[in-house]
Amino acid sequence: MKKILFGLCLLLGVMPQAKAQRVLSLDSCRQMALQGNKQLATTRLGQDMARDVKKAARTKYLPKVDALGGYSYMSREVSILNNDQKASLSNLGTNAVNGLSASPIGTQLAQILTSLGMNPTQVMPAAAVALNQTGTGLVDAFRTDTRSMWAGTVQVRQPIYMGGAIRAANRMADISQSMADTRIDQQTQETLYDIDKAYWLVVSLRQKQRLAESYRDLVGHLDEDVHKMIGEGVATRADGLKVDVRVNEADMKITEVENGLALSRMLLCQLCGMPLDTEFTLEDEREMKYEEVSDGLVASDGAIRPELQLLENAVDLSRQTEKLAMAPYLPHVGVVGGYTFSNPNVFNGFEQKVGGVWNVGVMVHVPVWNWMEGKFKVRAAKTATAMARMTLDEAREKIDLQVAQSRFKVTEARKKLVRARKDIESAEENLRCANAGFHEGVIDATTVMQAQTAWQQAQSQKIDAEIDVKMADVTLRKSLGILGIQN
């Protein structure tokens, strides 16, 4: 029973530590970095924005519908008749009777009425009143009653030719979306490059930590042997002090490597989006998976760098800007149609009902003279295109130089690794002979320490050479623009 309880306690004590120790591969670090990178997330938002801008540009080809309405109250209504005409019509009968009475025709008319047995003094005023009423009715019929007025219009506009502005704007939107996609690729490669450097830095320091510990063990064993020999009188105290100094140097080297390893782990955590105190183990810490850089990659032609693609897009964008600058100074043609309505209805005698009319037409706008403004703007846009093209050519030359340098570094790193491996063999044989000679008493401690130092330096150079080959491969892929999650 006690054994069972002890086993459970031991298991519970080990489980949290085992859970905390995550084993991370290079691909898993890359995936976490791509998922948690804030700059990459910002670039993706820019990609979404470019996509929406492209959709908005496409709508320029489609007809636009506008609606406009309003209400107006005026202190006076619109009048078709002037004041003199209104007065004349309102007194039409009075004016007519007075005119007849003062004329010979009026005298004859009075005689005729008398002969018919009618009283002219009664008939003429009655006729005047009737005519006055008729004139007043005409005045009322001409009233517009437009003091309170509603009006509105619905208009449809379909562009036919806008000087090439719509096509240029759509082409610019396409280029902008392509640039946003390229920036995703660029930021992805930058992120992968940073994570690869941090990953291999941790691997390098971890291997150097083990190397420093092995070197300290070597020096520690030598220190024990030397102090035994001092006790036996076959070695001097000066020999012991020399070895003690080397032991202290080995301990200090371990401290330096551990500090560097702790900082590099924190950097890797930050790039992967993990807490800085996360405990993890990398797959390549124990045994690095070394792969030779393929000769096909070293000899590959040209680079497909996102930077070049962005600059090429910038040149295309500048060309479209030229067309956009020229468009306002070319003829514009469009079709316009709509429906206009009002209350009072101006199309039916100002009737107090809503009424309207359909309309359709063609609009043509032709610039005639603008004091050479268009020529100067187009010339400035062409100059900007020439500048963008020169920037592209310069960047292409620099990138070609960078690719050539990366290829040289790959070749150099390969040679260093071959030489480092040969140096390891020599250093190990030299150390073996030195240890054998020391135990046989034919070699002093100083010679052994020199052999140990040479072995430690050869091992360190081998670690650096292996990491250099890895980083040279990564740098070459980045300079060629092919550094991706599958590499």
Image (cartoon, rainbow, N blue to C red):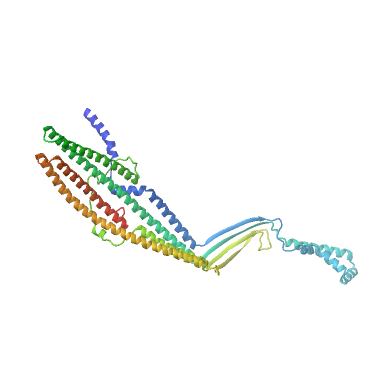
Residue 413, image x, y percentages: 24, 54
Residue 19, image x, y percentages: 29, 39
**Residue at image location 70% in from the left, 60% down from the top:** 78
Q: Residue furthest top?
A: 2
| Pick the front one: 354 or 450 | 450
| Pick the front one: 138 or 323 | 323
Count of marks placed on residues: 0
| Pick the front one: 485 or 405 | 405
Mark yes or no: residue 167 visible.
Answer: no
Q: In which quarter of the image is residue 10?
A: top left
Judge from the rendering whether residue 320 lies leftward or rightward of residue 422; answer left or right.
Answer: right
Mark yes or no: residue 394 visible.
Answer: yes
Placement of the N terminus among the 4 image quadrants: top left
Judge from the rendering whether residue 73 lies leftward or rightward of residue 233; answer left or right.
Answer: right
Judge from the rendering whether residue 37 lies leftward or rightward of residue 204; answer left or right.
Answer: right
Q: In which quarter of the image is residue 367?
A: bottom right
| Pick the front one: 142 or 116 | 142
Residue 72, image x, y percentages: 66, 56
Residue 241, image x, y percentages: 18, 36
Placement of the C terminus among the 4 image quadrants: bottom left
Q: Quadrant of residue 309?
A: bottom left
**Residue at image location 19% in from the left, 52% down from the top:** 419
Judge from the rendering whether residue 141 lies leftward or rightward of residue 189; answer left or right.
Answer: right
